[in-house]
Amino acid sequence: MTVQPPDQSNRPRTGVPPPEPHDGKPQEGALSPSFLVVAVLVPIIAGGAVLGAEVWRLNDRVDQLATKVNGIGATLGARSEETNAKLDATNTKLDAISQRLPAGSKRSEPKSRRRPALSPKASPPFAA
């Protein structure tokens, strides 16, 4: 009887490891398909929840800004109405003043065609 070392077997060497016994339990290194499904779905659901919360916050912020813009528009609208009323009153006063002026005192030439007045520095000194 020959004694073989413990690491050798009586099978021929083919380079393929021998099959391991299967008892219905998954092997230690293998992941079950249900674990993979859970591992993928948990981050997707968590990401969706985070994005949903951010969209909700963004919607609230947009509502705040819209309210602020509407308030500014109402304020500016009231101010523009006040300004228009003041301008109308001023135009009415100017029309009344211009109607009281004699027709001959109105200038017929535009201001750009008139000769510019000489400044005191440009005029010759008077001899006294």
Image (cartoon, rainbow, N blue to C red):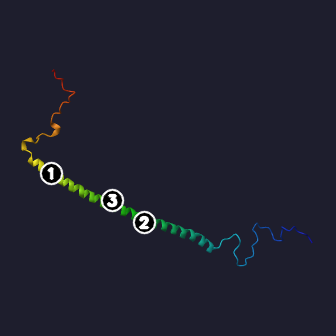
Residue named by callout 3: 72
Residue named by callout 1: 93
Question: What amino acid does circle 3 point to?
Answer: Ile
- Could you say where residue 8 lies in the image, as x and y percent from the top left? 84, 68
Residue 72 sits in which quadrant?
A: bottom left
**Residue that appears at 9% across and 49% down:** 99
**Residue that appears at 11% across and 50% down:** 96
Residue named by callout 2: 60
Task: Give SS at disc 2.
Answer: helix
Q: Residues within 10 Å of mark 2 (few under 14, many from 20)?
A: few
Q: Earlier in the sequence, mark 2 or mark 1?
A: 2
**Residue that appears at 20% across and 53% down:** 87
As drawn, is 72 to the left or to the right of 86? right
Q: Are marks 1 and 3 in contact (CB under 8 Å)?
A: no
Question: What amino acid does circle 1 point to?
Answer: Lys
**Residue that appears at 13% across and 50% down:** 95
- Could you say where residue 85 lies in the image, as x and y percent from the top left? 21, 56
Question: What amino acid does circle 2 point to?
Answer: Asp
> Marks 2 and 3, Cα distance to the nearest angstrom?
19 Å
